[in-house]
Image (tube, helix red, strand yellow):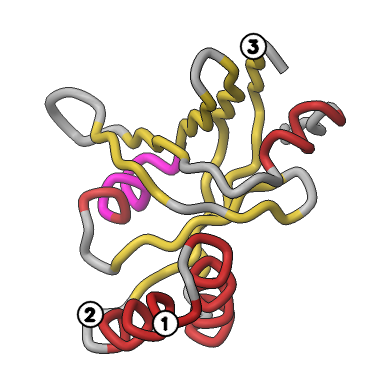
Amino acid sequence: MAIELGENARRFLQQPRFAVVGTNPADGPPQLSVVWYRMDGDHLLFVFSRGSAKEKNLRRAPYLSACVEDGYRYVTLSGLAVIEEDEGTTRALLRDLASRYLTPAEGKVWLASDENSGGSVTVRLSPEHIVTYGI
């Protein structure tokens, strides 16, 4: 069952920091990646490339962990991850993430390069476990 973020965690996560997300492959160690994210209420939204290890792992085992840090201050969230297939929603999230993390010129180049890839999906993390430190 998803749980609510505290006010300090929400404020911390609203800043444009990076998340390290972990998924579980069928065999071997966890697969970790540094990614952009956006808040949607108490959920975190990510965009993963179609066919990526992260997407494949989530389709097999739909649980995700994310750690967002700023030095020794951090929020770690774990829970059920839902893959959302709507291309329009994913494109809108990509534009939002580009404006959050890049300059307008960089965002335009990055969005154009993504259009030439194999596509992307939105991933929604509903936190079931939250750990905070130093916030």
Badge 2 marks a residue whose secondary structure is loop
Q: Position of residue 52 (x, y in %)?
A: 22, 58
Cβ–Cβ below 8 Å for labels 1 and 3? no
Identify the residue shown where x is 42% and y is 82%.
105
* Magenta region includes residue 62: yes
Q: Nearer the viewer, residue 67 or 60?
A: 67
* Label 3 sits on residue: 133
Displayed quadrant of residue 110: bottom left
Above or below, 77 against 37 in this view is above
* Label 2 sits on residue: 118
Relative side of 46 to 60, left or right: right
Where is the C terminus found, in terms of image quarters? top right
Query: Reading the chain from its start, which is encountered first: label 2 or label 3?
Result: 2
Instruction: Tell me where the magenta segment starts and ends, as one range.
Output: 56-63
Query: Reading the chain from its start, which is encountered first: label 1 or label 2?
Result: 1
Identify the residue shown where x is 48% and y is 33%.
66
Q: Amino acid at mark 3?
A: Tyr
Above or below, 32 against 72 in this view is below
Relative side of 28 to 86, left or right: left
